[in-house]
Image (cartoon, rainbow, N blue to C red):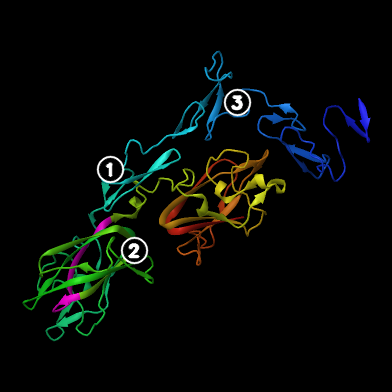
Amino acid sequence: MNVNNGCNIKTNYLCLFSADSCKVNVCLNGGTCVTEAGKDPFKCICAEGFTGPTCNETDFGPCNPNPCKNDGSCEIVTNSRRGDVFSEYVCKCPIGFDGIHCQNNVNDCAGQPCQNGGTCRDLDGDFTCKCPSPYVGKHCNLRCISLLGMEGGGISESQISSSSVYYGILGLQRWGPELARLNNKGLVNAWTSATHDKNPWIELNLQRKMRFTGIITQGASRMGTAEFIKAFKVASSLDGRTYTMYRPEGQSKDIFVGNMDNDGTKTNLFDPPIIAQYIRIIPVVCRKGCTLRLELVGCELNVYLNTTGCSEPLGIKSRLIDDRQLTASSTFRTWGIESFTWHPHYARLDKQGKTNAWTAASNNHSEWLQVDLLRPKRITGIITQGAKDFGNVQFVSAFKVAHSDDGKYWTILKDDKTKTDKVVPFESSLILTYTLKVSLRTQILHVDFN
C-alpha cells in the first residue's frame, strides 16, 4: 500500500481531500466529477456502461448499457444467441415501436385508421385523427348530429333568452324566446323581436360546454303574414360574457344564409364545429319581422377529443402535447450540471432515463407545473408519478389544481365540503390517479405543489 499526501491509495484513481477535488477531473471514461459536502470530497457521475468510484470499472452484462431504444426493456435470454450480436438478450418494445433494438417508430397511420375523410397524425405508439365536421371518434367513425332539444323540449324555457319580445294585438300576444322551437304549432308559435329593437338576438344556454355542428332555422306566420330571417350571424361564448363571432371555413364573411319562406327549414353546418356553452343567433336581414323557430345540432363535449369518452389520455405521455406546452416556475439541475437538468417537458408519465421527470429548483409552495392545452378541453382526472434522482426517491406529497381559459385569471379547485382549496395527497412514489368529482373545462391546467 502506498501513502501519498496522507491518503491511502488502494486503486488506480487519484484521492483528493481539498476543496478543489474536481479541479482535475479524476473520473475516467467520460465520467463527470462533482464535489460533495460530507465525508466524500467528490463523486463521479459515470457514462453509460461504466461504474466504480472513478468510473474505472465496466458495467458488465448484455443489458448494460441498455441496447434497446425508445424505452424498450432489455431481457437476458439463456441458451440462445442473437445472430446479429454477440450478446444473449432480447428487446421488448413498447407499443408503437419495433425492430431488433426497438429503433423503428411504427407508422400507426399506415393502415389509414381515420375514416370519413379524417386526417391521421402519427404519435409515439399511437395516432390521432383530425375529423371533418360532423364526424368525431377515435377513427372519425361517429357523427355528432344529435338534435339538442329545442323541438323535443330538452332545452327548458329558462335556458332561452332574447334581446326583446314582440307583443301583438294590444299586448295580448307574446312572441317570446321560449316559443322559438322548430316546428312549434299554434297561433303564437315563434320568437319575434320587438319592432324598435335595432340589434336583436336570441340566445340558448346549454348549461355545459357542447360541440355544435349545425343549426336548423324556420320562420313563422304572424297575423297571416310570412315572417322569417333571411340572413343571420352566430356568436358563441364559454362564460356568457365574452363572445366570438363565428365565420364559416373558407368564407370571408361571417353571415349565414337563412330561410326563403315562413314554414320551410334551412340547415347550416358549422365546420369547424363550435365549442361553447352559449349560442347566440343574431338576425341581419329579416322579412317583415325577425321571427324564428330553430333547433341546434351537435353532441356532448366528451367526443370533442375524437374519443368515445373522457377516459382517454390527453397526450402528455404520447407527446400529442409537445414540449412547448409544458412550462414550470423553475427547473432543478443535479449538481448544477446542464446535462442533468430536470426540464418541465420531462414530466411525462413512465418516461425513462437518468433525468426522467420535472423537478423544481426549490421545495416550497411557490413552485408549479403548467400545461397549455391550446384550446378548451374537459379534464376528468390527473395521473401523477414520482421519480429517482440518482437513487434518491422523490415525489410530490400534495398538490393543488388551478385552471384558466386565458392564462391570466385562475380558479383553484375547491373541496366540496370545506369550500377551501382542495389539497390532493400523494403518499408514495408509485402512480396516483386522482379523479375529479366535477370535470373541468379549461385551456390551461396549473398544478401548485405543497
Disc 3 on helix, strand or loop?
loop
Of tags 2 and 1, the one toward the viewer is 1
Q: Amino acid at mark 2?
A: Gln
Q: Which residues are magenta?
A: 285-298
Q: Which residue is mark 1?
A: 115
Q: Which residue is mark 3?
A: 63
Label 2 secondary element: strand
Q: Nearer the viewer, residue 399 or 248?
A: 248
Q: Earlier in the sequence, mark 1 or mark 3?
A: 3
Q: Quadrant of residue 73?
A: top right
Q: Residues within 10 Å of mark 1 (few under 14, many from 20)?
A: some
At label 3, counting other C-alpha atoms closer than 10 Å, the crowd grade (few under 14, some 14-19, many 20 or more) is: some
- In whole angstroms, how far apart are the C-alphas of marks 2 and 1? 28 Å
**Location of mark 2 (residue):** 277
Q: In the figure, is residue 308 to the left or right of 125? A: left
Q: Identify the mark nearer the N-term, 2 or 1.
A: 1
